[in-house]
Amino acid sequence: MNREGSNPDTNAPMPDLDGLEDKLGHSFNDTDLLVQALTHSGAAPSRLDSNERMEFLGDRVLGLALAGMLLKNFPEEAEGKIGYRFSALARAESLTRIAEEIGLAPHVRLSRGEEEIGGRNNPGILADCCEAVIASLYLDGGFEVAEQFVHTYWAPLMDENLSPPKDAKTLLQEWAQGQGLPLPVYRVTDEEGPAHAPRFMVEASVHERQPATGEGPSKQAAEQAAAEILLERIKGQP
């Protein structure tokens, strides 16, 4: 394949990959793998030609690399604390942050429609592409190549939190239990957007507290957002 390639949905050529390969720390033998990892479903001839299947694989490769990394760096911590660290490092926000660090946005292949509504800066799209890129590194160079990429970019994130972080849902649950209240309840109130880029609205409530609503590209992300808002509200109330 020509390294420049072409976008199946627009007349914009595929950006040069050399600079991106430098950021990834790997020169691809099969650049088609990297191009597919960068191809959003709306810009692909079919969903099988998009990066969706690679996202699935990349999520597993990232998980294995992070698990090994955490066990090595925190040999004295129990599984529960390791789990908190893992959740923080593997969440979509961390993937988006890495995508921004390596300058992934200009290389993503989008449909005209997605481009026009700002899809290139959509955190969910960037996170998904980052997972797919990890898969492309694994498929082209093996696990060691993908693992090295994860170590390079996730180690600084890991070092930022010397104590095991807890996500908002866990903190809200612990607060409720500490108050002797029922566990938080999460309810999807709305879902909008196309199938390839949905937005979920979720309401979080605890006993008689005023519910809080959060949104995100997945139910899990929206639940976290709602939990975080409700926690902030609780902190400001007697």
Image (spheres, rainbow, N blue to C red):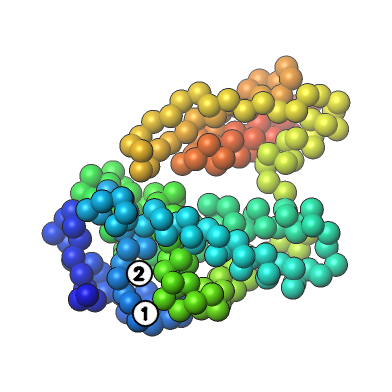
In the picture, residue 148 is in which quadrant?
Answer: bottom right
Image location (x, y in percent) of residue 69: 68, 70
Q: Mark number for residue 34? A: 2
User: For mark 1, what is the residue?
Assistant: 28
Q: Residue at x 64, y 38 (%)?
A: 228
Q: In the structure shown, which secondary structural element does the residue marked by tag 2 occupy?
A: helix
Does any portion of residue 23 appear in the rendered image? no
User: Where 194 falls versus 56 (above or below)?
Assistant: above
Q: In the structure shown, which secondary structural element does the residue marked by tag 1 occupy?
A: loop
Q: Nearer the viewer, residue 175 or 76?
A: 76
Image location (x, y in percent) of residue 127: 46, 55
Gap between marks 1 and 2, in whole Å? 8 Å
Task: Report the side of 5 relative to 224 (left or right).
Answer: left
Task: Report the side of 160 relative to 123 (left or right).
Answer: right
| Amino acid at dot 2 | Leu
Q: Residue at x 36, y 38 (%)?
A: 195
In the picture, residue 5 is in which quadrant?
Answer: bottom left
Q: Residue at x 45, y 79 (%)?
A: 141
Q: Residue at x 56, y 64 (%)?
A: 62
Image location (x, y in percent) of residue 70: 71, 67
Image location (x, y in percent) of residue 104: 39, 64
Q: Mark number for residue 75? A: none
Tag 1 and tag 2, C-beta contact below 8 Å: yes
| Amino acid at dot 1 | Phe
Does any portion of residue 201 appear in the rendered image? yes
Q: Nearer the viewer, residue 45 or 134?
A: 45
